[in-house]
Image (spheres, helix red, strand yellow):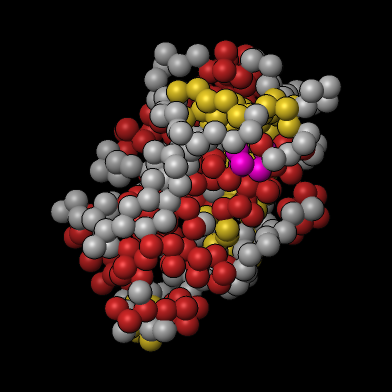
Amino acid sequence: MSTSSGSRIVVTGATGNVGTSVVRLLSEDPEVGSVRGLARRIPDWSPARTEWSAVDLASAQADLAEEFAGADAVVHLAWAFQPTHDPATTWRTNVLGSIRVFEAVAAAKVPTLVHASSVGAYSPGPKEHAVDESWPTHGWPDAAYTREKAYLERALDTFERDHPAVRVVRMRPAFLFKRESASEQRRIFGGRFLPGQLARPELLPFLPDIPGLRVQALHTDDAARAYVLAVRSQVRGAFNLAGEPPVDAELLGELLGARPVRLPRTAARSAIAAAWGLHLLPASPHLFDAVLRLPLMDCTRARTELGWYPEHTATEVLEEFLHAMQQGAGAPTEPMRGRKVG
């Protein structure tokens, strides 16, 4: 990594939930000389030492090798969650676009690639104890998100074999939330017209308690710190990133002051499938199936090799996010724009 004028880092998906946090932290790092953010639309927001390029990874015409020229590291975060009814479209951006990124990293001779994988890449696993990074990464085949994340794990296996000089780091974070992402994530998973005020406790007298719904959450800024540590270190391989405690109906009930009520998995899935089929809900029943099967992750490797630990508990993360949903919080980038509905 260059040291005379600071390192040069390129970030794809730089205007999204994780990208805005990673760009901000890199721009504040005295060892970083410049940050180039790639996004489909250039934002008004511009931190110190940051420049922008309008790039669509789904386009075969994008000259990514030119964008990466002279970079010390590429942090690949770009991802399209929608349209969930058209998996071929997300495949073009997420899988084919990511493979273009990998190929351009090799062509531009970038020494470090940090890739945003996910807990969603993991095969179904336990909810009673945590698994480490050796757990199989075959995803859940019926959901586009998990299928794409798992496919890219295999693509990176091949990339590492063919390009051993490139240091490849795979981040596998839990569900990521922050105040500024509230409006974006409400639109992605709940729809454009779902009122954020539905997060108010007094409107939720009871909370569905669905068997298997036990997951992990993490503050986006905590995940971003792990990405920056990976850029600055010489680590390789995969790292689990998650906060504690695990999130289940009991924890959510305490946060919202709502009583958990047991709801059969089939009933919950049928309701989601009906709403998704009518285009009332962006989140698909296939993703619901995958979430119920996600394992809990052990983050020991991130602590011992990266020196990383989360500064926020999962409870604090969810409290911040729920309050932000009520307020329609956002950030000054196109994907993160705030909007209060209802």
Quarter of the image for the C terminus: give it: bottom left
User: What secondary structure do most residues of the magenta stretch adopt?
Assistant: helix
Report if residue 50 is visible in the image: yes
List x then y, in percent, for residue 129.
Answer: 62, 70
Quarter of the image for the N terminus: give it: top right
Report if residue 140 is visible in the image: no
Question: Going 36% across and 70% down the picture, which residue do you hit?
Answer: 199
Magenta residues span 22-26
Question: Going 38% across and 46% down the picture, which residue do you hit?
Answer: 337
Q: Nearer the viewer, residue 177 or 154?
A: 177
In which image quadrant can residue 168 be found?
Answer: top right
Question: Going 64% across and 15% down the picture, which residue do you hit?
Answer: 69
List x then y, in percent, for residue 118.
Answer: 54, 48
Looking at the image, residue 319 sits to the left or right of residue 306; the answer is left
The correct choice, above or below, for 279 with respect to 334 in the image is below
Within the magenta stretch, is there residue 24? yes
Residue furthest to the left in view is 278
The correct choice, above or below, for 266 with respect to 335 in the image is below
